[in-house]
């Protein structure tokens, strides 16, 4: 893809690494709180004695209402995204299995998407090998455009499908094919003006090469699959 000035997020030499970002496989957990109030009524057919009538009942203490978390607000022309849900690595993604690799791939893209929206690359770094050149490139772009008051609008990514034949290419190294799409991106300067834009990208395949270590999966490289 042709680079669009210095702010093109998806020109990584011959890879389309950042054009694909993870989707928001954003895993949202709903906490269902239920409370039960119970009271002891008189026995069947019984009448309360004066002593029983005077026995204080348990005070009806109201169950504290949990404070709702602040609502998610995507970035727009007025400012960066707020309260972006943090991606959660599922347990299966920690296993050296076909299912584990596919779940890890989805998570990796969700961490990428989170980085685009927030500028926080910690989750992405934790699942990327330090030697991953394409990972380094997108991380630097994210950092650059989330400093000095700048921010990115859009850029959220979604994974339509992931598949792997789970055949080792090197010891403990495998490949997965991810069908990924990414929203359009607007690059905002600190005063809100738009420095540049990158159009949305339709669903296209990426090759994710990942290695399994004692600490779980790490992305070795992520590249656009050239047809």
Image (cartoon, rainbow, N blue to C red):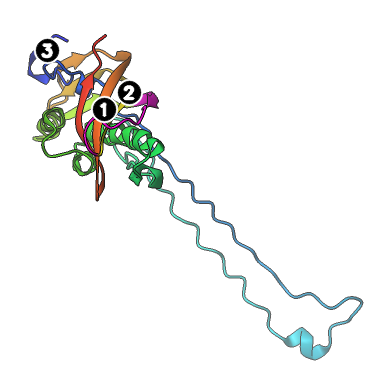
Q: What residue range appears in magenta?
A: 158-171
Image quarter (top left, top right, bottom left or bottom right) of the C terminus: top left
Q: Give the percent coordinates (x, y) of residue 194.
A: 16, 19
Tag 2 secondary structure? strand
Judge whether residue 84 can be spotted in this image.
yes
Of circles 2 and 3, the one toward us is 2
N-terminal of the pair, mark 1 or mark 2, is 2
Residue at the disc numbered 3: 3
The answer for how far apart the CA atoms under marks 1 and 2 are is 6 Å
The answer for how far apart the CA atoms under marks 2 and 3 are is 24 Å
Relative height, residue 150 to residue 201 (above, below): below
Q: Residue at x 14, y 27 (%)?
A: 134
Tag 3 secondary structure? loop
Q: Is residue 77 left or right of residue 47?
A: left
N-terminal of the pair, mark 3 or mark 1, is 3
Q: How would you rate the neighbour count of disc 1 (Cα within 10 Å): few for under 14, some for 14-19, many for 20 or more?
A: many
Return the residue nearer the eye: 111 or 148.
111
Q: Give the percent coordinates (x, y) of residue 8.
A: 14, 18
Q: Give the percent coordinates (x, y) of residue 6.
A: 7, 18
Q: How would you rate the neighbour count of disc 2 (Cα within 10 Å): few for under 14, some for 14-19, many for 20 or more?
A: many
Which of the 4 image quarters holds residue 188? top left
Q: Give the percent coordinates (x, y) of residue 112.
A: 25, 32
Whether pointer 2 and pointer 3 mark residues with C-beta atoms closer than 8 Å, the reply is no
Which of the 4 image quarters holds residue 56? bottom right
Residue at the disc numbered 2: 177
The answer for how far apart the CA atoms under marks 3 and 1 are is 22 Å
Residue at the disc numbered 1: 208
């Amino acid at each position: 893809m042709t680079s669009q000035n210095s702010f093109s997020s998806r020109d990584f030499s011959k890879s389309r690494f950042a054009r694909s970002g993870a989707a928001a496989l954003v895993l949202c957990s709903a906490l269902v709180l239920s409370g039960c109030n119970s009271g002891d009524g008189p026995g069947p057919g019984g009448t309360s004695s004066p002593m029983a009538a005077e026995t204080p009942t348990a005070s009806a203490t109201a169950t504290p209402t949990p404070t709702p978390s602040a609502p998610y607000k995507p970035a727009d022309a007025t400012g960066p995204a707020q309260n972006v849900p943090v991606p959660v690595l599922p347990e299966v993604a920690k296993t050296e299995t076909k299912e584990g690799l596919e779940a890890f791939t989805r998570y990796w893209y969700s961490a990428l998407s989170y980085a685009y929206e927030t500028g926080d690359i910690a989750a992405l770094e934790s699942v990327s090998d330090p030697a991953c050149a394409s990972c380094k490139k997108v991380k630097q772009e994210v950092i650059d455009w989330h400093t000095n008051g700048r921010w990115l609008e859009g850029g959220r990514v979604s994974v339509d499908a992931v598949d792997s034949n789970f055949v080792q290419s090197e010891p403990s190294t495998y490949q997965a094919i991810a069908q990924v799409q990414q929203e359009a991106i607007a690059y905002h300067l600190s005063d809100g003006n738009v420095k540049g834009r990158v159009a949305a990208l339709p669903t296209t395949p990426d090759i994710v090469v990942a290695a399994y270590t004692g600490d779980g999966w790490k992305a070795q490289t992520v590249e656009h699959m050239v047809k």
